[in-house]
Amino acid sequence: MTSAATTPSSVTVRVPAKVNLELLVGAPRPDGYHPLSTVFHAVGLFDELTVTPAPEWGVGVTGQQSLGVPSDGTNLATRAARALAGHAGVDEPVHISIHKEIPVAGGMAGGSADAAAALVACDALWGLATTRHELELLAAELGSDVPFLLSGGTAMGSGRGEVLAPVLARGTYHWVFAVSEDGLSTPAVYAECDRLRGDRSVPEPEPSAEMMTALRAGDAHALGEALHNDLQAAAISLMPALGDVLDAGLEFGALGGIVSGSGPTVAFLCEDHEAALDLAVSLTASGAVQDVRRATGPVHGAQLVPAPRPL
Ligand code: C5P
């Protein structure tokens, strides 16, 4: 543990959103989770989370995307901080302040990102130097997407999404996100996927050669063709307007479009920066989309923001 003289008064961490470039979903396991083969890709829409020592645990949320984020003990960031405290035997409550840019309940892992950020921030605040492996184990208990948000980049996910493996990926990709004002519940989308499949037998999910080849080559056109999400039909079934959003983006020239994770955010891949600007303008003008964001990927996972130097 660090001495009081070197303990920082607060720690800030920046953490990105994710899209799944490929999301293949198997039949539900006995524990209710679905086996996945997925390719996670971290994109530059960021939440910033600051932890400050406080007399009791608390959380506050600000930013355009703060509506609907729980500000009590059910907040995933609070649960993450308390899980690390329990693991390390620390009894030092913190106030967590989250500035949200990542859409809430949007299929971009906003809650999971905040949990990953809270682990990294509290580890630094409390001077624990927890190993990466231990942080990943804690992360996996908090949610299937949390381990990926610790590392970021582009990575394969299996198990229920928490088992990560590196993937050879070249290039920087330009994305436009059509953000919906309404969220979709992840369990509801998985349940709808099962319902739509009915009694059909579902193969074990395995990464596609098409996706791996596109990423290895850094070929945006091939990646646009290879984007695939088994949850997309279920998300559209629960929110039919998403089908129109996808059609609009593709008509306006996107290389590919996909519902992000369990939705309802729709991600469009563009040729370059200019094309992404053009698509964002066209989608906004069309009125088919409530809110539009641009970002590039891949980007790093949760990272400490250096404290400003004293003058
Ligand atoms: O792991 P996480 O808490 O993010 O998952 C949220 C919900 O999404 C789970 O309760 C489950 O209903 C569904 N899920 C699933 N299979 C996965 C991941 C999530 O069925 N691989």
Image (cartoon, grey):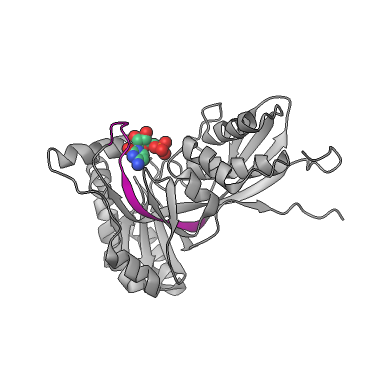
Tell me which residue sits at (87%, 56%) in the image.
311
State whether residue 292 is above or below residue 199. Answer: below
Q: Judge whether residue 171 is colored magenta.
A: no
At horizontal 48% and vertical 35% (from top left) the residue drawn is: 141
Left or right of 186 on screen, residue 233: left
User: Quick check: can you spot residue 137?
Assistant: yes
In front here: 134 or 235? 134
Q: Does the magenta stretch include residue 30?
A: yes
Image height check: is 192 above or below 22? Answer: above
Residue 253 seen anywhere in this rendered image of the structure: no
Q: Say which of 3 and 96 sits in front.
A: 3
State the residue in front, 158 or 251.
158
Whether residue 138 is situated above or below residue 304 in the rendered picture? above
Residue 256, percent across and down? 31, 65
Front position in the image: 252 or 235: 235
Tell me: 242 left or right of 1.
left
Q: What segment is highlighted magenta in the picture?
A: 29-44
- Number of callouts: 0
Residue farthest left in this picture: 199
Q: Quadrant of the N terminus?
A: top right
Q: Is residue 232 left or right of residue 198?
A: right
- Image coords of residue 276 (percent x, y): 42, 68
Name the residue at 14% across, 44% down.
201
- Where 174 sits versus 5, above or below? below
Ligand number 1: quarter of image: top left
Instruction: Tell me residue 212's x, y (percent).
Output: 34, 66
